[in-house]
Image (cartoon, rainbow, N blue to C red):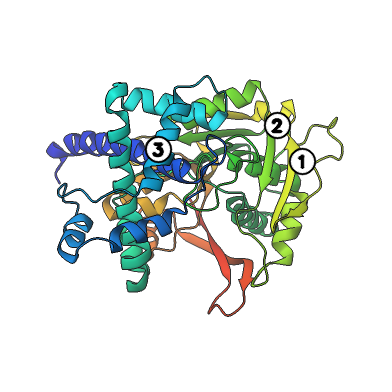
Amino acid sequence: MTAASFAAFIDRTRAHNIRRVREGDLDHLVFYALQSTHFTKLPPIEPALSAKALVQSLDPVVREGFLRGQAAPEPPIPASVRARFAALIDALDSASRDPRLAYFRALVQATFPDRRQREAALLREYLRAMRFIYQKEFVAQPAGAAAVAELYRARGLSTDTAVEAGYVVYNGLGIIRALEPDRRIRRVLIVGPGLDLAPRTGLTEAGPPESYQPWAVIDALLSLGLGRAGELQVVAADINPRVVDHLTRSRDNPPVLTLVSEIRESDTVTLSADYKEYFAQLGKAIADGDDPPRGGIATLAQGHLRKTVRVDKTAAGTLTAATLDVVTERLDAPAFDLVIATNILPYFDDVELMLAMSNVAGMLVPGGVFLHNEARPVLGEITDALGLPFEQSRHVIIATVRGAPAPLFDSVFLHRNK
């Protein structure tokens, strides 16, 4: 790569990332088609089990070709899968106002405008998604974390998010508060806030699709005393324009958040006391004062923690949304005191990571903090070179699993811009 070829490289990368956004949206469509109970009464199909049954039914030679991405011969698609996709297409043609269905209706109409070709096109997306899941769960997973990470750097860009993502950010902000009790954070950038649309496993449709992280960040900053109502400005920037549109509407129409823990407590899984405490207080600083009890009461339903929070207008007015490909772009805006990027950096290869970190550093004020949960060692080398050195980290336990070698945990890392 040279100065002369750099602009063309950026253009290719931007176009490639747009394609990855499309693939990520279609992945969620496949997961929705297999699991949703709102558009059909047919039994849900667990995606990983579907991938395993599909791939392991193939002749070894055909299986090898399929996993390498060869287009032919096309594997036979189970009748149960075909039935659910046929039901989905009928639902997409209906007048249903279900919010997830509306999201996917717009996606399908834009991506596959010819109604006659839709079913075949969606079944091809099913095969593509099953190929990735099988490679991840049954090929890369046994080979180790490095193999899984390599897969993620080539797959579609997921919009997926969960309530648990806010817990690691809350702990990171708690570190800042403990080290600098008088610090005030006024401008915050959240890169890739995502949308809880249709995860690969455990789809719950208790509430409409929602982007939890911006509200969790605002709530944490206010409750920890790092930010003040009236002066806090939070920009949620996502590469997916549909996520941006959703968040833009939320500013004028504050949502009622249906918060459900992704991890389910059971005979073998026990949520940590600290995580339960976090979930219990989540939302109290942003809840509408007319919504008793303020911040909602957490309950345990079928093993999942659950509560609802009505966001007040002041908190909603704190939030703005922007479209951003952090690998190729920077926002044309005043610099930020804090940049947060969780669960998006694994999608970048090392070159893309360098570009993204350069853009993050360029959007931070001197002394500004970058908060993330990417443990890749090369990230430390890159941020050191950019004058954004690592300062603090913590591991936070979300749940323990009986018989497992380690608990379910996440990590948070803090860097300071020189």
Residue 242, percent across and down?
46, 29
Q: Amino acid at mark 3?
A: Phe
- Quickly name the residue at label 1: 285
Q: Secondary structure at mark 2?
A: helix
Q: Residue at x 66, y 59 (%)?
A: 179
Mark 2 or 1 closer to N-term? 1
Cβ atoms at labels 2 and 3 below 8 Å apart: no
Label 1: element kind: loop
Question: Residue beneath label 2, please?
Answer: 315
Residue pictured at 56% horizontal, 29% vertical:
99
How crowded pointer 3 is (Cα within 10 Å; few <14, some 14-19, many 20+) is rated as many
Check residue 88 in the rendering and tell me which mark sits there, or answer none.
none
Disc 1: CA contacts within 10 A as few (<14), some (14-19) or many (>=20):
many
Q: Earlier in the sequence, mark 1 or mark 3?
A: 3
Q: Is residue 78 above or below residue 59?
A: above
Callout 2 touching callout 1 (CB < 8 Å): yes
Residue 56 vs residue 42: left or right?
left
